Image (cartoon, rainbow, N blue to C red):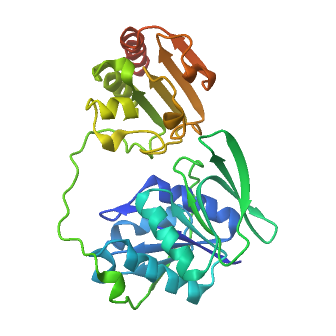
Amino acid sequence: MSEILVLVDHVEGAVRKTTAELLTIARRLGEPAAVFFGSEIDTAREALKHYGAERIYVLDSADLTDHLVAPKAEALAQLVETQQPAAVLISSNAEGKEIAGRLSIKTSSGLITDAVDVQAGDGGVTTTQSVFAGGYTVTSTVTKGTPIVTVKPNAVTPQPTEGAAAEEAVDVEISAAAKTARIVERRQRAATGRPELNEAAIVVSGGRGTGGDFDAVEAFADALGAAVGASRAAVDAGWYPHAYQVGQTGKTVSPQLYVAAGISGAIQHRAGMQTSKTIVAINKDAESPIFELVDFGVVGDLHRVLKSATEKALARRS
């Protein structure tokens, strides 16, 4: 059975949920093999084994961790050349997509980004994507080289299964050209107590209709254990940090439940959340374009609606 390389997405060794999803997908396609950059494999080993990694390639070098993405792409290209995997799966975040693009060039291989599903196809892999701001769903295959696919978070539900997790240390040669941008400082982002926006199973977003008051949005999100997002209008107005923007020029999310509060539904925003499994909108304008997209819609004042919904959610939890 051919190997499927999965680039491990981790923070201080802790494996993110997206990696568990990629390993689950990899089992459909072949034999999952995790690729771990860094020295903290001891804190990640059990999680990788738990989600079916048959092999773990450990690349521990300061050349990889002290620089930006170019050395990682170069190292991954060398691993692809030696192992000849059937496909490479990478999380569809900013760093992952840059690594994937560079890897595609270095290996002369086809690249598919932002897949929401990956299945075994005739002679390779077949992916599903949502394109043109969610207006179309397409299936794609790679016709040259090793298929390189970045997969959106929440594309699948992680399925635990024990793997052999046989470790292999890999030495790679990193060129001087790849090390021209070095990381000189790292600062940890302040914890909010909420899940990461692009990994959360539930996202509650606020827009222009909040009038700058996100208290009701945050309270409802906390009642559901959800992440908080914001529309571009809210971010541009300075009401919420840019890091939480959902949309074509912000983050793309695909949660199980997406709640849009006071968001009109402009195409810029729809492009970032249209693949959500269930969409609920709250807007006082019954003609708002967001209602064309939703599974459930509430016409009313978002502050009153969210307050009532929060009380109901907390009552059910207790």
Write the residue at 30% across / 75% down.
65
Residue displayed at 73% across by 54% down: 139
Query: Does 78 sit above or below residue 299?
Result: below
Q: Position of residue 93 (x, y in %)?
A: 45, 56
Q: Position of residue 224 (x, y in %)?
A: 41, 27
**Viewer-side residue, 78 vs 41:** 78
- Residue at 40% x, 10% y is 308
Residue 51 left/right relative to 178: right
Visible residue check, residue 26: yes
Report the side of 48 relative to 71 (left or right): right
Q: Nearer the viewer, residue 56 or 141?
A: 141
Q: Quadrant of the C terminus?
A: top left
Q: Which residue is at a point 63% across and 84% down the rendered structure image?
A: 84
In this rendering, position of residue 84 left or right of residue 318:
right
Residue 258, x across and y down, in percent: 50, 31
Q: Quadrant of residue 145?
A: bottom right
- Residue 318 in view, yes or no: no
Classify 58 as above or below 110.
Answer: below
**Residue 49 horizontal/vertical position (percent):** 50, 67
- Judge whether 261 appears above or below 50 on screen: above
* 249 horizontally vs 106: left or right: left
Observer-nearest residue: 199 or 230?
Answer: 230
Q: Quadrant of the N terminus?
A: bottom right
